[in-house]
């Protein structure tokens, strides 16, 4: 472990469920503050540029509506709006901690957030602001894993950090909740993730990261200090996909 962080610019993917804490739905204030503290630490103490892609699954997922007969594209648009709610919540707690932020949304809503503009996002990061990316790709039929990968490539981040929750601390050979013989992998290749159907991120985002040589670290973001440890190069934390 050196003194300098492993990467100087990252995309942190936070799923909406990570915001819900034990409640399982909506936003839990204590959980949000914990996550914000983690981000502020790596931004301010480690000088790491952080763009956060937020999900919306704590409020709504398109698949839920589609499963009940809704038009999928419409249901996905509801999901995209859910990510904006989470983004504004995260912005509020980060700014209460004194951390300048900007929310950029792929779905245009001028009164609430800046539009996503790549060059502007990079400029914010260079000025030490945390950029929160909402609205996914702005297109239905995706989850927020794909914009996490795409935006990382666009803003020249060196890695995607996929924060998990609910005790999931990395990638396992099988689902540890179902299969007691499942073991955690320290490192795994993109191809293995795809071929073995390992639960990491959506296959679309894995393929994108593979094509663009973007490493992914899957780790439990709800454990205090884990985000910093990943950036310190502590290989005991999470699973590296490369
Ligand atoms: N979504 C979408 N396009 C995108 C990103 C998200 O349509 O580019 C919708 C989709 O319905 C998804 C919902 O937004 O289910 C919430 O995002 P996600 O499922 O990724 O949230 P997470 O699981 O990370 O909380």
Image: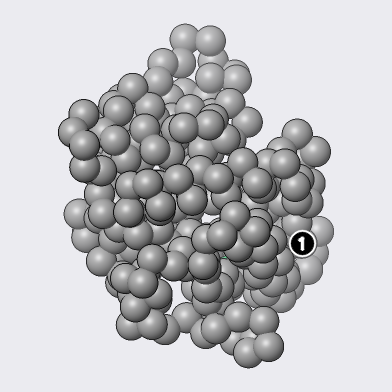
Q: Please tell me how crowded label 1 is: few (under 14), some (14-19), or many (20+) other residues with Cα within 10 Å.
A: some
Q: Which residue is drawn at 30% across and 28% down?
A: 234
Per the image, the residue denoted by label 1 is 65
164 vs 201: above or below: above
Residue 231 coordinates in the image, percent (x, y) = 32, 40
The image's colour scheme reads: one colour
* Quadrant in which the C terminus appears: top left
106 vs 130: above or below: below
> Which residue is the extreme one toward the front?
98
Q: Which residue is drawn at 54% across and 15% down?
A: 179
Residue 41 coordinates in the image, percent (x, y) = 45, 45
Q: Which residue is drawn at 29% across and 26% down?
A: 235
- In the image, is the residue at mark 1 within 8 Å of ligand 1 by its beta carbon? yes
Q: Is residue 73 left or right of residue 226?
A: right
Residue 86 coordinates in the image, percent (x, y) = 67, 61
Residue 44 coordinates in the image, percent (x, y) = 40, 52
Res. 79 visible in picture: no
Q: In this view, does 46 lie to the left or right of 25?
A: left
Q: In which quarter of the image is residue 1?
A: top left
Res. 132 visible in picture: yes
Q: Nearer the viewer, residue 20 or 125?
A: 125
199 vs 172: above or below: below
Q: In this view, does 189 lie to the left or right of 164?
A: left
Q: Which of 184 and 7 is in front in this view?
A: 7
Secondary structure beneath label 1: helix
Q: Which residue is drawn at 47% across and 10% down?
A: 181
């Amino acid at each position: 472990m050196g003194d300098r962080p492993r990467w100087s610019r990252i995309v942190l993917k936070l799923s909406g469920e990570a915001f819900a804490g034990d409640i399982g739905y909506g936003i839990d204030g204590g959980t949000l503050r914990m996550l914000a503290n983690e981000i502020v630490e790596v931004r301010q103490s480690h000088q790491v540029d952080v763009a956060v892609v937020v999900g919306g699954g704590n409020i709504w997922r398109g698949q839920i509506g589609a499963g009940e007969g809704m038009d999928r594209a419409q249901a996905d648009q509801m999901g995209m709006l859910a990510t904006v709610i989470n983004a504004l919540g995260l912005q509020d707690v980060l700014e209460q901690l004194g951390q300048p932020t900007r929310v950029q949304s792929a779905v245009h809503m001028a009164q609430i957030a800046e539009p996503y503009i790549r060059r502007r996002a990079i400029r914010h990061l260079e000025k030490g602001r945390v950029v929160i990316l909402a609205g996914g790709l702005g297109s239905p039929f995706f989850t927020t894993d794909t914009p996490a990968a795409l935006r990382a490539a666009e803003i020249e981040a060196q890695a995607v950090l996929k924060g998990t929750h609910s005790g999931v601390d990395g990638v396992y050979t099988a689902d540890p909740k179902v299969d007691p013989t499942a073991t955690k992998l320290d490192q795994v290749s993109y191809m293995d993730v795809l071929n073995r159907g390992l639960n990491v991120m959506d296959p679309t985002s894995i393929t994108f990261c593979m094509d663009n040589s973007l490493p992914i670290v899957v780790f439990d973001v709800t454990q205090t200090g884990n985000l910093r440890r990943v950036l310190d190069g502590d290989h005991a934390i999470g699973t590296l996909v490369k």
